[in-house]
Amino acid sequence: MTASNTDTDCDVCIIGSGAGGSPVAWRLAKAGQSVIVLEKGPWLEDQHFRKDELACCRRAVYTPEKRLEPHVVEDRDADGAWVAKSTAESGWDFWNGNLVGGSSNLMSGFFHRLKPVDFRQLEELGPIAGANRANWPIGYADLEPYYDQVERLVGISGAVTEHPNLEPRSSADFPYPPTLEHPVSAWIDDACERLGYHALRVPRAILSRGALGRRACEYSGYCGSFGCSSGAKGGARAAWLTPALATGRCDIRPRAQVLRLLSDARGRVTTAEYADAEGKVRQITAKRFVVACQAVETSRLLLNSPGPKFPNGLANNSGQVGRNLLFSAGGSGSGDLEYAALGAERAVALKTMGPFVNRALDDWYLIEDKGFAGAGNEHRYKGGIVEFLLAHPNPTGLANRAKWRNGELVWGLPLKRRLEQWFRTDRTLRFEVFCDWLPTDDCFVSLDPKVKDRWGQPVARIRIGHHPHDLQVGRYLADKAERVLKELGAARVRSSISGAPPPNLMAGGCRFGTDPKTSVLDADCRAHEVENLFVTDGSFMPTGGSVPYTWTIYANALRVAEGMLG
Ligand SMILES: Cc1cc2nc3c(=O)[nH]c(=O)nc-3n(C[C@H](O)[C@H](O)[C@H](O)COP(=O)(O)OP(=O)(O)OC[C@H]3O[C@@H](n4cnc5c(N)ncnc54)[C@H](O)[C@@H]3O)c2cc1C
Ligand code: SF4
């Protein structure tokens, strides 16, 4: 690597082009500011996204080679001791989507808002021993106008379902009608009604009709983990970066791996130093910097950026950078709907491919049940949601999962029979449970003292301890979801709740708050210690809520950008 010339100045340099960075790029460029976005991955467009099963589930086409860019994961062994292992050896992967638009290109687009209780968990539900529960420095009402804007700017399709836990809304309904629904959705509605549950229609960040210069959903069936070739999916590239580019003031630089941020003697960030596609080190100077590399990499970049006023990493004199990392807690379950048991008409309906299930349950977002004995307040606990979906149709993924049964490798004729059964005798209805991953001192990002990446930078070491209460909540919700599957007549109903983090749903690490001793960012997501540094990915979240994060990340990034405009 060789050092080269300093590049042109801009008003704002954004690092990471995903869900956290792109709304800021759009808003600031629209307001007349010059913006440079530095993105470590390549720039792929709609036409590049093929439904290539092998590429997407056997080879890491959208993520770096772990041999060259590993993470180190610290997990407990059987005796409870922390053991560190590189992902190059373990098979774990904490990269999610490294391309222009970030992992939001690959999301399924299940979109949920947080609820008012998520902003004041400590105040409303009290402390839990061993957890760093906190209130947010803003309330739901502060974020609601931006949730609302996201519906129109990204294009969210849905229909408001009157519901006991419906969060307050400033607009009557979604701007686009719901996406097409699979026949099984109506069966779920009936089953829930019989059980006294309230099936909720899930909003999707997917256009149900052509709008915003993008085509409508083509119901490819290959949505989650795959890029969208119609433009319907409201990932950051389609929804924010395309209009940002149209302003003529946003410059996106792909294959630009930011190595460190340089700060001066006054403690201001002056420069982003990055390696370009050829490995040349280049620099961007800007008045303000926004970091949005996704939670783990954002903390890692700050820790890798010591300066004259920050010997332990940028904005880290408090020692808080990397602390209170969050994931979405919970797990998943499934049951098999057997064609033979359904009768001919329903069996044909069940075989429909393409449309979405779009059903969730959030009856237990707060668990007020004397039979539930978790940690914390008596008989009032934070719960979560259950999302129903049909098993992903990717046969390679199915075969890959089918090859193990009870810890034994299944192969040859037994594997063929098992796959045949999946394709010919039944269809699997799945559910995913989302609940809070309580922030603890055992879940954080630091720098690995030995392992370095291809550019010689220390890699992130991720400790992934969870709080046992998370499992109790997850189990409570999974039992409810299992009842729905049984009510539907599904065979082999099963579920698994675990403390293993889902790497695609991460947040925290740079929590915002009012106290600089216990938080990295202030209420505007500006670093307490660095006047011209902002963080706008999910890192800011002090508690995660019980839903996937992207709608909240989009809304908060818009809110922060508005604040940057004064
Ligand atoms: C398969 C899948 C399904 C999902 N489904 C859903 C869903 O249904 N609903 C939902 O709400 N969420 C979903 N998500 C999660 C969603 O994608 C994330 O919450 C969201 O994208 C996070 O935004 P972010 O800005 O933190 O990170 P990203 O969107 O990943 O953006 C971070 C960007 O920073 C870049 N970067 C990292 N380090 C550097 C560096 N040093 N220099 C330059 N660039 C860097 C990365 O390459 C990346 O492009 C899903 C994710 C996946 C992978
Ligand atoms: S066309 Fe529809 S189903 Fe296919 S990836 Fe795009 S949004 Fe998802």
Image (cartoon, grey):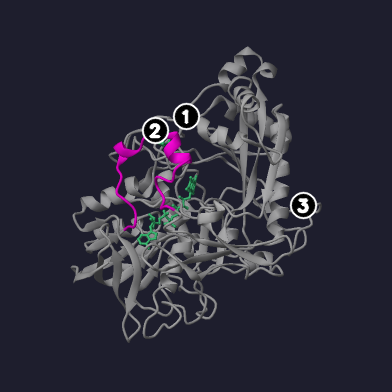
Which of the four quarters of the rendered structure image does ligand 2 lie in? top left
Disc 3 and disc 1: Cα gap in Å?
Answer: 35 Å
Query: Which amino acid type is shown beneath numbered disc 2?
Result: Cys
Extreme residue toward the top, this view: 344
Q: Is residue 538 left or right of residue 282?
A: right
Q: Are the two marked residues, 1 and 2, in contact with CB atoms closer than 8 angstroms? A: yes
Residue 35 location, x and y as percent? 25, 62
Q: Name above or below for residue 360 compared with residue 244.
A: above
Q: Which residue is rendered at x = 30% and y = 66% of the image?
A: 274
Q: Circle 2 sits in a helix, a strand or a loop, which is it?
A: loop
Q: Is mark 2 within 8 Å of ligand 2?
A: yes
Q: Are the two marked residues, 3 and 1, in contact with CB atoms closer than 8 angstroms? A: no
Q: Which residue is rendered at x = 69% and y = 33% of the image?
A: 485
Q: Which residue is rendered at x = 44% and y = 47% of the image?
A: 171
| Residue occupied by mark 2 | 217
Residue 19 location, x and y as percent? 40, 54
Which residue is at the front of the view, 251 or 97? Answer: 97
Q: Which residue is rendered at x = 47% and y = 82% of the image?
A: 317
Extreme residue toward the right, this view: 371
Marks 1 and 2, the one that precedes in the sequence? 1
| Residue occupied by mark 3 | 369
Q: Quadrant of residue 522?
A: bottom left
Q: Which residues are magenta?
A: 39-65
Query: Which amino acid type is shown beneath numbered disc 1?
Result: Leu
Residue 294 location, x and y as percent? 44, 59
| Residue occupied by mark 1 | 180
Marks 3 and 1, the one that precedes in the sequence? 1
Which residue is at the front of the view, 310 or 137? Answer: 310
Q: Quadrant of residue 456?
A: bottom left
